Amino acid sequence: MTEMICILCPRGCHLSVGDAPGFQVTGNFCPRGAAYGREEMESPGGS
């Protein structure tokens, strides 16, 4: 389990992201937070 803060909006949701496969995300208030958590686990820093 990895903890991170979503930076896509000012709300700053505290996300918990599970391990592969699937990277289940909890703590998000919108779908963008879930997508952000999965993307950061697959490709940190976005590249």
Image (cartoon, helix red, strand yellow):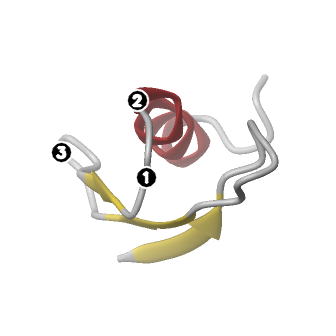
Quadrant where the C terminus lies?
top right
Q: Around disc 2, counting alpha carbons within 10 Å, would you say few (fewer than 14), some (14 to 19), or many (20 or more)?
A: few
The disc, 2 or 3, on the residue closer to the chain's N-terminal end is 3
Q: Secondary structure at mark 3?
A: loop
Residue depicted at x 59% and y 61%: 13
Residue depicted at x 28% and y 64%: 18
Q: CA distance from mark 2 to mark 3?
A: 19 Å
Residue 28: assigned label: 1
* Percent of width and height locating residue 15: 49, 64
Residue depicted at x 76% and y 29%: 46
Residue 13: assigned label: none
The reply to whether dot 2 and dot 3 touch (C-beta < 8 Å) is no
What's the amino acid at mark 3? Answer: Pro
Q: Which residue is mark 2?
A: 31
Q: Nearer the viewer, mark 2 or mark 3?
A: 2
What's the amino acid at mark 2? Answer: Pro
Q: Secondary structure at mark 1?
A: loop
Q: Around disc 3, counting alpha carbons within 10 Å, would you say few (fewer than 14), some (14 to 19), or many (20 or more)?
A: few
Up-down: is 2 above or below 43? Answer: below
Q: Secondary structure at mark 2?
A: helix
* Percent of width and height locating residue 22: 20, 41
Quadrant where the N terminus lies?
bottom left
What's the amino acid at mark 1? Answer: Asn
The disc, 3 or 1, on the residue closer to the chain's N-terminal end is 3
Residue 21: assigned label: 3
- Residue at the top extreme of this rendering: 47
The reply to whether dot 1 and dot 2 touch (C-beta < 8 Å) is yes
Q: CA distance from mark 1 to mark 2?
A: 7 Å
Q: Around disc 1, counting alpha carbons within 10 Å, would you say few (fewer than 14), some (14 to 19), or many (20 or more)?
A: many
Q: Is residue 34 left or right of residue 37?
A: left
Q: Is residue 23 left or right of residue 28?
A: left
* Percent of width and height locating residue 24: 23, 51
